Image: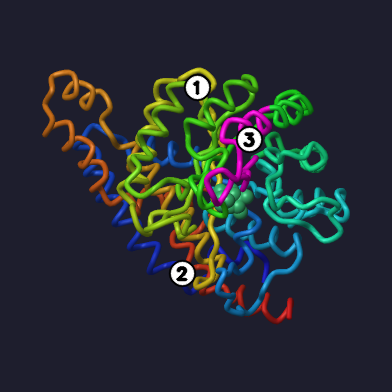
Amino acid sequence: MSLTDVARPEQHLSVVEREHDKDFAELAARLERDGLTADTLVDAVLEFEVALPSWALATGGTRFGRSPDSGKRRTLLEKMEDASLVHRLTAAAPRISLHIPWDEPTDIDAVRADAARLGLGFDAVNSNTFQDQPGQALSYKLGSFSNPSAAVRRQAIEHHLHVIEVGKALGAEAITVWLADGSNYPGQMSLRGSFERVRESLREVYAAMPQGWRLFTEHKPYEPAFYATVVQDWGSSLVLAQSLGDRAQCLVDLGHHLPNTNIELVVARLIGEGRLGGFHFNDSKYGDDDLTSGSIKPYVLFLIFHELVLAKQERLPGFDPAYMIDQSHNLKDPIEAMLQTVDQLQQAYAKACLVDAARLAEHQASGDVIMAERTLKRAYETDVRPLVAEARRRRGGALDPVAAFRASGYRAQKTAERS
Ligand code: LRH
Ligand code: MN
């Protein structure tokens, strides 16, 4: 069974195809009434691409344990095989984001060859100073870049220089730096000194980046630190990025905000400062829950994409965010969860492309609150599923990726192959 069969199992085709054609034609007629052209919107949806996190293609766990799942992936190649399948079915996930040392390549050339064969590229590489690795000389227990010990900071800097080397060898063009650094008790850590040490250490990492590379700083309010996290919020991340240089930008992980934070406002602020580097898409109810995007707060996801599409339509200089996912799946099949996620992101993007931005601006200017809100809601309340399905089909993907995956028997085949 080749991967191409996956997208279009024969017996499955006709019924779904016919229903889809009917749904798409109806939506196209509805959009035409709003002066919109379905084909133009399909092309817009096809511009949206997102990178898959290697670490979410393995079954995640919680601090309370992990549920065994069949077909557990062990190697980078197996994660790339699964990522490639997600791309085949959604036509929108052509890159994978690696985490070092979790995905430390043993043979770079082999990884590059496999990636080429699987039609995959490499997005931002992720460093890891939030775990002590076996054989590591010095512990990061009291921080990495913020650690009072110059020797520990040096060790962390060397790790980041190594991550850049791995990324360079694989053709990546960015590094994401999330630091667990922080404290659990008042007095434990100098609140200003720790930030200065992080800034000083990151200056060296920034200077080591090849031309054209970007450095993404990722903020997080708490966990594992439960009193103060050094890069705690978008403000700290922005100050850091602005002090490092033009190629330092802020990465927004949707789960890294305290309850009721207006995340679309944070996104708009960073866009306005020209410092929005990228995203870790996921969803959450309480904390950094890393749940499937669009599963808990789909309207927030839409409002975030509304800000992104406005910036794109305004052709803001330097606006080029790296779209990446950061989730962990301990209940769902990781591939199915990824297929759901990419579909949810494609839908949020499509809905945002439906917003009549000119009409919205008019209502905002005239202070017509109701009509402004209705203009947004009209787009959000449009069922765009036929649009994103059509976009996938036109690029050889599946109308319904989860259904196609289940019909493909891929899971059973891989379980047998990998056990
Ligand atoms: C931290 C984080 C970070 C990753 C890790 C896997 O919570 O969001 O982006 O390095 O998850
Ligand atoms: Mn993240």
Dot 2 falls on a residue whose secondary structure is helix
The quarter of the displayed image where residue 164 is located:
top right
User: Ligand 1 within 8 A of label 3's CB?
Assistant: no
Tell me which label, 3 or 1, sits earlier in the chain. Answer: 3
Is residue 339 visible to us here? yes
Tell me which label, 1 or 2, sits earlier in the chain. Answer: 1
Pointer 2 residue = 403
> Which mark lies nearer to you, 3 or 1?
3
Is residue 168 visible to us here? no
In this rendering, would 182 be left or right of 24? right
Find the distance from the CA under tag 3 to the CA under tag 1.
Answer: 26 Å
Q: What amino acid is found at the position of numbered circle 3 in the picture?
A: Ser
Please rate how many residues cluster around mark 1, counting C-alpha atoms within 10 Å: few if below 14, some from 14 to 19, many from 20.
some
The quarter of the displayed image where residue 206 is located:
top right
Q: What amino acid is found at the position of numbered circle 1 in the picture?
A: Gly
Dot 1 falls on a residue whose secondary structure is loop
